[in-house]
Amino acid sequence: MKVPADTLVPLHERLSFAAGAAISCGTGTAWGAFERMGITGRDVVAVFGQGPVGLSATLLAKAQGAEVIALDIDESRRSKAKEFGADHVINPLEGTVAERIRDLTGGRGASMALETAGAASAGIDALNCVRPWGTVCLVGIGAEVSLSVASMLRRQLKIMTSWTMSIQAQHACANFIVERNLNVDALFTSEWKLDQAELAYETFNRQSGGKGVFTF
């Protein structure tokens, strides 16, 4: 694809082409969300969904010193989240999510929640699991989330969305990953050639496991 040179971010020599693709997509989405949320090492972050965006969020939040609670209904994705540094993993199908997160946080709840699953139930759980003055960011596409303003009002929540990022932020994300020596390539669980596209998309559509990549 031919594009203007000033729209590109140089690929660091320590990054693979696959890592660069992740940074410009799912990993970058997680980075941009955390930039908007203002994450710090003092935060307890609940990450809903441990697909490519959620796993990237788990990896980036731990690298910034936060405590991470990773949630996913898929066992393999929860296991991957532990490998990526999650302090706790939760299956949302087992018990009440907000109560379990409060149990893990001394009754307070998470200070931040990032919803990446694109499921209405995950969005509601994200809103319910944060403590007063907490921050919730919704990036998952495909869900419709209804909420009672009255039930959220007294908790003084900050609720936001986030969509992709600027070239400058993408560059900052890449630099952070290189400086911290983060293994973004570990996101990929499947590698395909272009003539395997049909099989690849059938596999992707199962929405389990990690992230696939086409290589040339």
Image: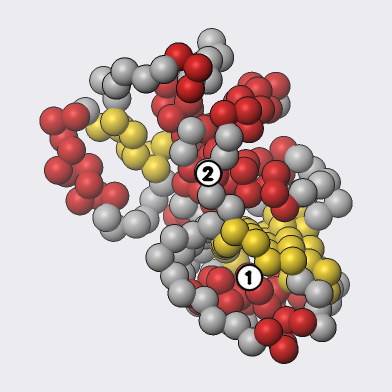
Compared across the picture, whether 25 is left or right of 89 comes to left
Residue receiving disc 1? 126
Q: Residue at x 22, y 42 (%)?
A: 200
The residue located at (48%, 33%) in the rendering is: 24
Q: Return the residue nearer the eye: 155 or 46.
A: 155
Looking at the image, residue 172 sits to the left or right of residue 142; the answer is right
Left or right: 81 as drawn, with respect to 18 = right
Q: Are marks 1 and 2 in contact (CB under 8 Å)?
A: no
x, y percent for residue 198: 14, 43
Q: Is residue 60 above or below residue 118?
A: above
Instruction: Give the number of the mark in front: 1 or 2.
Output: 2
| Residue at 70% from the left image edge and 74% from the top image edge | 129
Q: Position of residue 161 (x, y in %)?
A: 59, 59
Residue 187: x, y in percent? 47, 38
Q: Amino acid at mark 1?
A: Ala
Residue beneath disc 2: 164
**Could you tell me if residue 108 is visible in this image?**
yes
